Amino acid sequence: MNGPSKGWWVVARKEIADHLHSARLAVVAALLSLSGIAAVYAAGGRIRDVAAQAGDDPALFLKLFTVAIENTPFAFVNFVALIGPLLGIAFGFDAVSSERAQRTLPRLLAQPIHRDDVVNGKFVAGLAVIGVLLAALMALVAAIGIVRLGIVPRAEDVGRLLVYLVVSIVYIGCWLAFALMLSIVLQRAATAALTAIGTWLVFSLLAALLAQILAGVFAEPGTVEHAGLEQAFGRASPAIVYEEVTAALLTPELRTLGVILPEQAFRAVPGRLPLDESLLLVWPQITGLVALAAVLFGVAYVAFLRQEVRV
Amino acid sequence: MVDTDAPVISIHRLTKRYGPVTAVRELDLEVRRGEVFGLLGPNGAGKTTTILTLLGLAEPTSGTVRVLGLDPTREAVKVKRQVGYVPDSVGFYPGLTARQNLRYTARLNGLRDVEDRITEVLEQVGLGHAADARAGTFSRGMLQRLGIADALVKNPSVMILDEPTIAIDPEGVRQVLSLIRTLREEHRMTVLLSSHLLYQVQEVCDRVGIFVKGRLVAVGSVAELADRLSEGRVVVEVGVAGDPDAAARRLAEVDGVQEVSREGDLLLAVCGGQSRARIAGALTGAGHTLLHLRQRSSHLDEIYHRYFHHERTE
């Protein structure tokens, strides 16, 4: 008669439909698209200025994503790094608490699905919407670049951008999983949203500063030791780890993430790494981000399964 | 097929503890096929906890629970496929219409081609006209009926309703109760409902269980419980014109009257079932003018109060 359909997929489909109709999607997507497109537009102008000399730069297309707006530190990738987490938070902070507030959770759990189908479906739905949104934005940006600059990406550029897309989805997935966890543990959506945004502020904006201060406690500023410590402390923030991955993926000239002394860089022959070498450079960081997303989701999962239906 | 005499729900020595709090204590209960069973008791008596264990949404600390012969802890999905559940103050997604809400439930049950079924259950609960209105615009009573429709979509053989009459107006209560009656009479469903508003549900329940502080203190039909409690005695209200004290003295002398008390203008005589016939004669014979004479019905509220009282004084 009626074949059993997968519970998590039914939940995910409903959640995706909800996300697509939600005002929060419109707000965050508009914010991300406007800033991203502005950055690319500005970058396009600057690239044209330097393109005369750098016309033979094979990675010119990637500069579209990494060249900052004049007099600001913001390029496309910076906007994604900054606003992307908000996307994850927006789709997660009330995922479960809203079901409680609307009193739909007991009814949902009384349907013939497994309890984890609810949390799995919600996570998959969030990831899917984030992925589609990010992919669409990058395609739009690439299209603008092609029209404005008249350059076509090479296969390797496309490869780098695809890996960047996947890593970005994983990074935003960390924030989605974190927000989802908060929506399970905290009763009120407003508390969860504030907690998530506070954490985002600390890790995205203050992490570099905190790492610097902390390194200053252990080493004399200006020394190699200090720089090394600063980097080590900074890597406690997923935002900084993600920034490193982005840099390595979209700047083929980048050959190391470690501390480089001027004498080491002196007379170094500028060259570019192939994609697999760039990937190798940040493989630990990528693994770390995947692990973080998995752990955060795992915590959310266990918290949801152990929670009483009536709380 | 299925053994029709086997109880649909059987609970044996169920205990459920939340940390130091014991919500349900050594509960034994059986619900038979095709009956409406009312689980009655004050808030916090453990009714919802018991219901959650029936659906596998709470695990028993000890004891066994069987629903349709299945263990809800181990085979929750199978149990939930056959049991319709309407939680206490049921909620729906406010941005979706009634139909969209039910469609989601149908999909979660793995059902396809459900549009006709949804229309049918919405008609059945009297919400056919509101099928395409957003659930956010529904009154509490409409939500309760939508909850019943939601549970009916899967065509269950057992319905469990937690506090189905709470927070709705008298007309809404009447509609919900008549729906419950229809479920049993026309659809041959077994219904378990919980309530603390006893007199509201007594008319639809074939049997009731009185539940106080995690214990079931009495089980039976309303009439049985009334008999058991009254021990054959009845309370007769008497109103007379003139001197009530004299009438009270005369009443106390009537053969079989055990106790006389006053309540406002009325005299209350506690007496054996047979002696109430003599009361009118005795009073008019003594020259009193009888204005009022009525036997108090022992409805469930009284029964429950007395059980509750017993429990407290023990």
Image (cartoon, coloured by chain):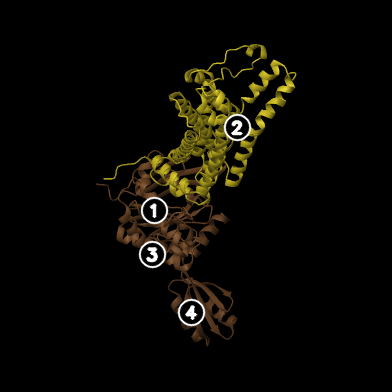
Chain colours: A yellow, B brown
Quote the CA–CA distance across marks 4 and 2. 95 Å
Residue depicted at 57% across the width and 15% down the height: A270
**Residue A250 drawn at (x, y percent):** 53, 26
**Residue A222 drawn at (x, y percent):** 73, 19
Q: Residues within 10 Å of mark 1 (few under 14, many from 20)?
A: many
Amino acid under label 4? Leu
Q: Is residue B116 above or below residue A198?
A: below
Residue on which the image places disc 1: B102
Q: Earlier in the sequence, mark 4 or mark 1?
A: 1
**Front one among A72 and B306:** A72
**Residue B99 drawn at (x, y percent):** 39, 56
Residue on which the image places disc 2: A68
Quote the CA–CA distance across marks 4 and 1. 53 Å
Quote the CA–CA distance across marks 2 and 1. 50 Å
Amino acid under label 1? Leu
**Front one among A300 and B99:** B99
Quote the CA–CA distance across marks 3 and 4. 48 Å
Quote the CA–CA distance across marks 3 and 2. 58 Å
**Front one among B134 and B242:** B134
Amino acid under label 2? Ala
Marks 4 and 1 belong to one chain: yes
The label number, if any, that marks residue B293 in the structure image: 4
A223 left or right of B278 in image: right
Q: Residues within 10 Å of mark 2 (few under 14, many from 20)?
A: many
Q: Is residue B104 above or below residue B300?
A: above
Q: Are marks 2 and 1 in contact (CB under 8 Å)?
A: no
Amino acid under label 3? His
Which mark is nearer the camera, 3 or 2? Answer: 2
The label number, if any, that marks residue B129 in the structure image: 3
Task: Judge whether residue B145 can be spotted in this image.
Answer: yes
**Front one among B123 and A73:** A73
Q: Residue furthest left?
A: B1
